[in-house]
Amino acid sequence: MFSIGQLSKRTGVKIPTIRYYEQMGLIDAPERSEGNQRRYTADGLSRLSFIRHSRDLGFSIEDIKGLLSLSQHPERPCHDAHEIAVQHLGAVQDRIKKLRRLERELKRISKCDADSVSECAVIETLADHGLCETEH
Amino acid sequence: MFSIGQLSKRTGVKIPTIRYYEQMGLIDAPERSEGNQRRYTADGLSRLSFIRHSRDLGFSIEDIKGLLSLSQHPERPCHDAHEIAVQHLGAVQDRIKKLRRLERELKRISKCDADSVSECAVIETLADHGLCETEH
DNA sequence: CCTTGAACCTATAGCCACTAGAGGAATTAT
DNA sequence: ATAATTCCTCTAGTGGCTATAGGTTCAAGG
């Protein structure tokens, strides 16, 4: 039996976040001590680790609800889990593309060696989209 | 003189967002028509374009306030603008790194060809961080 | 057994950068 | 003149937390 603080330390999820997940229905309300404090089992620990890990990978709370309910039904085909992962992969690749364009742009404009703002490439580029090298 | 709708079309910034920027002090409150509707000048247009562009590049509202006040004082050294841009570049590069690790991970786990969830790599990987190839 | 201090409880509000909706007034086109 | 569209303000909601206030319970030391 873990207290919420112990659970937090073991999973790296902050205490208010754990309570938030409970409220959002991601984790079941655990048993309570006589004094009404939450007491978690190993099950709760692994479920929270699953959530933590999924959040690290950028899945939304809604996605995770889906993934969790899948993981609870091992007999079902894993098609749905793939769909969620693949869809997420697409979104991630999009974000990477955009960020790399942005990186190029920022590198370019921060090379500026002007003395005053009037000739500064940072300001100029921000003011005039036409000066950009790439679309974003 | 543009109405807020025309300004929105020209800059691609949604109407409620323009009003939000006004509230946040990013743009000055414009003149009003007799019937109390906002009327913008070319100045307002270019300022909003600047903001739009900066947001596209991922600068925060606070960053943009700084950049705007710099752009308003062309005699000042552009050191500060650089600092903002360079700092932002660092953050962008960090995000890219994380996303690329994540991409690898998602590619790996979505190759799974199991029939049921019980052997599915997606679920397994999410449940057990130890199976990951990379840190994240 | 009693005290102290840490950890816990609930409930509420705040963060960012918007977005949506209600209910009404002004403008524009026909 | 009327109808359609755009505009106004105000309030509340989004996601995923985080912080605060004011109180209760728990575990360890004396």
Image (cartoon, coloured by chain):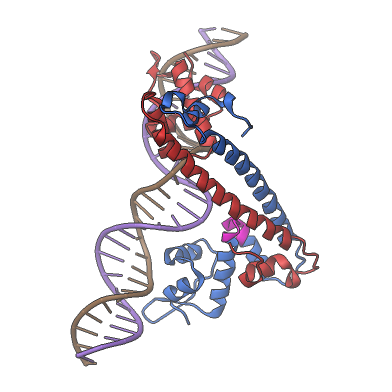
Chain colours: A blue, B red, C brown, D purple
- Residue A100 vs B7, above or below: the answer is below
Number of marks: 0
Left/right placement of residue C12 relative to residue A108 reads left
Left or right placement of residue A6 versus residue A26 in this view: left
Task: Please tell me whether residue B105 belongs to the stretch shown in magenta.
Answer: no
Q: Residues in magenta?
A: A56-64
Q: Point out the image quarter for the C terminus of chain B.
A: bottom right
Q: Position of residue B37 (x, y in %)?
A: 42, 19
Asked whether the viewer can see residue B76, the reply is yes
Q: Is residue C23 above or below residue D28?
A: above
Is residue A58 a member of the stretch shown in magenta? yes
Q: Nearer the viewer, residue C11 or A68?
A: A68
Q: Is residue A75 visible?
A: no
Q: Residue B61: x and y, percent?
A: 43, 38
| Depth check, front residue: D23 or B26 | B26
Depicted A6 relative to depicted B134: above or below: below
* Front in this rendered view, residue A119 or B23: A119
Q: What residue appears at the point 36 percent right and 27 percent down from the top-left corner?
A: B76
Q: Residue B4 location in percent, x, y?
A: 48, 22
Observer-nearest residue: A135 or A52?
A135
Q: Is residue B41 above or below residue A131?
A: above
Residue B47 position within the rendered picture, expressed as x and y whole percent measured from the top left: 45, 24
Image quarter for residue A108?
A: top right
Residue name at image x 72 percent, y 67 percent = B121
